[in-house]
Image (spheres, helix red, strand yellow):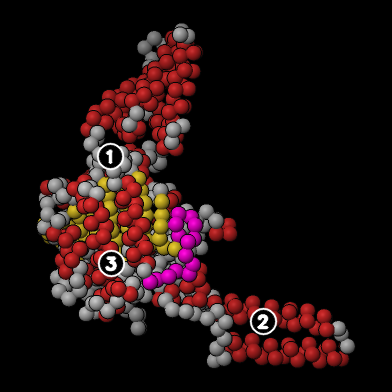
Amino acid sequence: MSLQYQEEHYQILYLEHISIATKRRKILRSGKYILQSNVTTRRNIHALAMILASSRDMTFLLGLLSVQSVRSQARNVSRAQTSHPMAPHESSRRWMVLSLALVSACLTAGETQKRRPNVVILVADDLGIGDLGCYGNTTIKTPNIDRLSDEGVRLTHHLAAASMCTPSRAALLTGRYPARYGLVGEEGTPPVIVHVASRVGLPPEEVTFAKALAAANYTTAAVGKWHLGMRCGLGGLGCRGPQDHGFQSFFGLPFTLSVEMEGTHDFWSFSPEVRFNKIIARLCVVGVLTILVWGWLTHCTQETQNILFIVLALALIIPWFVHTHYRFHTEKWWQVSPWMDQHLNGILMRNTKVVEQPLVLEGLSQRLVDYSLNFITEHAHDENPFLLYHSFAHVHTPMFTAPEMAGKSEHGRYGDSVEEMDAGVGAILDALRQHEIDDNTIVNGQRTGGHNGLFKGGKGMGGAEGGLRVPGIFRWKGHIPAGKTIDTPTSLLDTFPTLLGLTDLPPVNSFFPELPERDLDGVSLAGLLTEGTALRPRSLIHHCRQAIHALRLVVEARVYKMHLAKHKWSPGSTQCC
């Protein structure tokens, strides 16, 4: 077999394999980037080893290896007469990188033949830490979350990276402070994303734990509240949102809940007490009389008068619409009317398609949970593990439940919402057990934003403890001790590196060698959770928008907190930012 034929043969074999799935093309691009790199580093070797090992196809590995071998021989022969006898050839360097990577890949593949654990992330919205039985509440019934705590580790000093929804969720997914990439708002702008159509969102270059696990052959899904921006194109097309950040499927709310999404709201709202409406009414009267008098004096046709009436109507309706349904004339210029909020922001999406508009609140929790249950059923026994990110809409306002859950709690609608959410947690845990995968599934329950009854302050209060303390639970049967309590300060920032540690995956930079190296602000809790290994001294920053309001220093069992800004208690509000 000639050298040229042999290389073409392996190229065809290689292309046949990478055409099997889109993932293979990604593997090819990443591998090619590393082999074309000018530096033989341990990072390159390790990254290529992970790419090769994750392919799970020995023929694919041998095809790539053989192509590189043939090319190396050809280039060495062609350069032998012109190069210095002792000079290392570029092909030799690449051959060394690929050889070392193959050895490492074979070892890695041998270690990871056992299916990696599934990952289920359960996120509550605005849930008070004092409203769960496992955190001391005796009047709201949360038996399923309590069971999760009994079977895992409960974190008592768990902290949100921000006291508002959008930045807190961004930190959870990326392991990095949202102030690094501007997702915190600034003076004169809202601290969270306020519209589905907003161009603001989680930057596409940020790496989420979903993107990292997807690169490790996990099947990923996001269910429930997103609130990190959809980045829609012209005309509302291409609203991929979660699917641009590693989630292969999405079913849920692209925005968030608001009190305006409950009940009905009038589009034709015209209050005579509003000064602007009085002006509109007077102009309407003057305009109509003017057209009638002018028509009588000039004897114009009825058709001409009708055209003038239409022009007058448009001239009055357009400014009325802008003034009534937008708030450009107020300090909070980004707000819209209740009708606009309900019909444009209150939507339910499946991937990029709107399936419900406006949103029907009754039964929403059950619809979201049903989607997660179907996802678990579909992928419970796949060759590849799965990541399920289920973000409950509860217990953010407005308070709502299905009819069968209403009126059961001693704490009214809020208690009913908490107990309905707990029922959803129970359904997901039961599904894992029914499919006999609960022993090989990491379950993590957390909360973002919200009020906190045990500590001073609440949602939106920068460095106030009440806006930062959140419940946090990790469960992995057989790996994480059951019924254990950890008082060490931890953060939502730690979720990403902890998942990498528990699933025995390399640092995030190894998955995307073509991207600039980046440090995560969170630390892995894997050793702390499984073996009780103490964390190294660390500091945590508490922001209010872009400003730093407090610092927390943790040294062994000692915790120090320094406030750099006073709480800005706004009249009639609990927020400082």
When the figure is inspected, residue 95 is found, relative to residue 294, above or below; the finding is: above
Label 2, secondary structure: give it.
Answer: helix
Label 1, secondary structure: give it.
Answer: loop
When the figure is inspected, residue 169 is found, relative to residue 129, above or below; the finding is: above
Q: Which mark is residue 421?
A: 3
Q: Please report whichever mark, 1 or 3, sits nearer to the chain's N-terminal start.
A: 3
Whole-percent x, y for residue 436 in the image: 21, 48
Give left or right: position of 522 versus 30: left
When the figure is inspected, residue 139 is found, relative to residue 498, above or below; the finding is: below
| Cα gap from disc 1 to disc 2, whole angstroms | 62 Å
Give the residue at mark 1. 506
| Cα gap from disc 1 to disc 3, whole angstroms | 34 Å
Query: Of all residues shown, which one is farthest toward the right?
Result: 299
| Start-end of magenta stretch | 349-362
Give the residue at mark 2. 316
Amino acid residing under circle 1: Pro
Q: Please report whichever mark, 2 or 3, sits nearer to the chain's N-terminal start.
A: 2
Amino acid residing under circle 2: Leu
Q: Please report whichever mark, 1 or 2, sits nearer to the chain's N-terminal start.
A: 2
